Structure formats: structure tokens, C-alpha cells
Amino acid sequence: MAVVGAAMAVFAWSLIQSSEPYHGGKPLSFWLKQYATYSSGFGGTNQPEAQWPEVDTALRSIGTNAVPDLLRMLAARDSAMKLKIITLAQKQSVVPVHFIPAAERRREALQIFGYIRMNGVSAVPGLIKLLRNPEAAVRASAAIVLADIGPGAKAAVPELVRALKDTDFHVKSVAWDALWEIDPLTVDRIRAEERAQTK
């Protein structure tokens, strides 16, 4: 039975292996936890400020050097079969299985993109593709990152305009936000056209 459990755990491990970016031998998730610690109480008695530059360097390095990994994290999806296998694997105790859900992966990628902002401009072509992803959460995430990048993401304007007609309300909302951050003139033009149509 132990052999079966171990085999299941190994199979589950192969499913959840991702290209989570590393810096200094530590994964992105580690650095994000460090960032959360410092940002929630920077300068407090338990906050070693001397270590902050290390965290800052790690996040900026990951953000600018691991764009393909971050894009894959934004597009992460957990199939029903994958979740079932992982649930079964976590019931055994031979090999520990640490699983990070797709939603958490997206949240981590959003944090990094939000941290590097305009320096994530190399991700724009990939983000444009994600705006057409079948998952609404992925489309919304792409628009949020484009808003963080700002004017450097102008190539995404046509696709963001299309996203204003998305069937998902949240996607439409963040697409408006992104357009405002990237190209306010386009927002003004669209609103002027809408006003003209109502006359």
C-alpha cells in the first residue's frame, strides 16, 4: 500500500511541477512571503531592515528575468482530473505533496508584475494573447498587469478595446482601467462615441 501511495505522490508531483522562478536558490513563493512580512511592518522591532535589499533584488530579478514563467503562472489552470489526483496523493503520508492552486499562482504573478510595473514591458505580447484566454480570471489578470505596465503597453490597446465587450463584468471593468492607464485619449474617444450614439 505504501508503494502505491508513493507512486501516486510521485505522479501528483509530476503534475504540479511548475517553472516557478527562483532567485538565490529560493522560489518566488518564498520571496513573496518575505515581501509580505516587510511590507506589513517595515521598520518594526522584528523587521531586519538590512535584509530588505535582498528581497527587493530578488523580486526585481525574478520580475524582469522570468517573464515567460510569470505568464505561465497567470495562465495556470487546474483541471478536475489534476485536482482529483492531487487530493488522493495528499491522503498518503509516504511522500509529502505540496500543491499551490492555480488561483494562488496567478496571485503571485500579479504581485510580481505589480512590483516591477513598467519594467514588465517585455511581457506585453504574451499578455495580449492572454486577453483571449477562455478563462475569465486569466483575461482579467492580463488586463490588470497591462494597467500596471502603463503607456509601455500601448500595443495592447486594440485588444483591450475588444475586451470592453467581454461577457465577464470584471474583465470589462479592468479593461477600462488598463486603457485609462495606457492611453487615456482612447478612453476619451470611446466615451465621446458613446455619447454621440445616445443623442
Image (cartoon, rainbow, N blue to C red):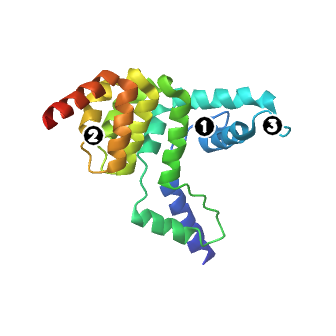
Q: Of 178 and 6, which appears nearest the observer?
A: 178
In x, y percent, where is residue 109? 51, 40
Q: Is residue 92 left or right of residue 68?
A: right
Say which quarter of the image contains residue 183.
top left
Say which quarter of the image contains residue 4.
bottom right
Q: Which mark is residue 49?
A: none
Q: Amino acid at mark 2?
A: Leu
Q: Identify the residue position indicated by label 2 in the image.
A: 164
In x, y percent, where is residue 35? 67, 38
Q: Which residue occupies 44% across, 63% down?
A: 82
Q: CA–CA distance between discs 1 and 2?
A: 36 Å
Q: Which mark's residue is nearer the viewer, 3 or 1?
A: 3
Q: Amino acid at mark 3?
A: Gln
Observer able to see residue 120: yes
Q: Is residue 104 left or right of residue 169?
A: right
Observer able to see residue 18: no
In x, y percent, where is residue 41? 75, 39
Q: Which residue occupies 64% across, 63% down?
A: 96
